[in-house]
Amino acid sequence: MYSVSVQRKFIAQHALIGGDWGAENDVHAHAYVLELTLSGPRLDQHGYLVDILDIERALDAQIARYANRVLNDLPEFAGLNPSLERFARFLCERLAGAIRADTLSAMTVKLWENDIAWAAYAQPLN
């Protein structure tokens, strides 16, 4: 199985809801690092799993949606706790719709919110 990964850094804000997490209940920012990993069993005619430029374009489009925004204000987080796990899932689902190649079989988004904490969401691609 082949894999290729690309990272992007961005800052976004959120306020946790639904529990008592102290200062985390107030709007605060994280310097996120999004790591997208694509996997598949074979390469294309050029020897690529998928062109890295295509990955970068898809990542940049998604980052533009979230960077410097308050996640709580976005429709996908309406009434939901904007947890790291949920954010990773939303990013993965949106990226799965943006990156298409018949060589791909799976996608994983690993989302770091600081130097020691990350969450990931993986899904098969058809």
Image (cartoon, grey):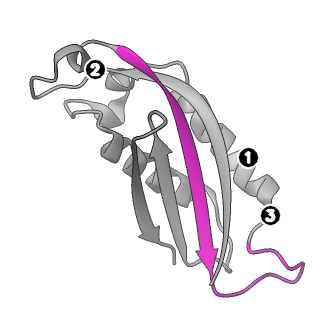
Residue that mark 2 sits on: 15
Amino acid type shown at disc 1: Arg
User: Residue 57's mark?
Assistant: 1
Left or right: 87 in relation to 22:
right
State the extent of the magenta-drawn residues as a range.
28-49
Indicate which disc, 1 or 3, sits on the residue closer to the N terminus: 3
Give the label, 1 or 2, closer to the camera.
2
Q: Say which quadrant the N terminus sits in.
A: bottom right
Q: Quadrant location of residue 36?
A: bottom right
Pick the front one: 3 or 78: 3
Q: Quadrant of residue 39?
A: bottom right
Helix, strand or loop for disc 3: loop
- Marks 1 and 2 sit apart, C-alpha to C-alpha, by 29 Å
In this view, 4 is above or below 70:
below
Estimate how packed mark 1 is, as few (under 14), some (14 to 19) or many (20 or more) residues with alpha carbons within 10 Å.
Answer: few
Residue 41 forms part of the magenta stretch: yes
Q: What residue type is labelled 2?
A: Ala
**Residue holding disc 3:** 51
Q: In this view, does 58 lie to the left or right of 97?
A: right
Q: Which of marks 1 and 2 is nearer the N terminus?
A: 2
Extreme-front residue of the structure:
116
Indicate the secondary structure of the residue bearing disc 2.
Answer: loop
- Give x and y (percent) for residue 59: 64, 45
Crowdedness of circle 2 by 10 Å Cα count: few (<14), some, many (20+)?
A: some
Amino acid at the residue labelled 3 = Asp
Give the Cα separation between the discs numbered 1 and 3.
10 Å
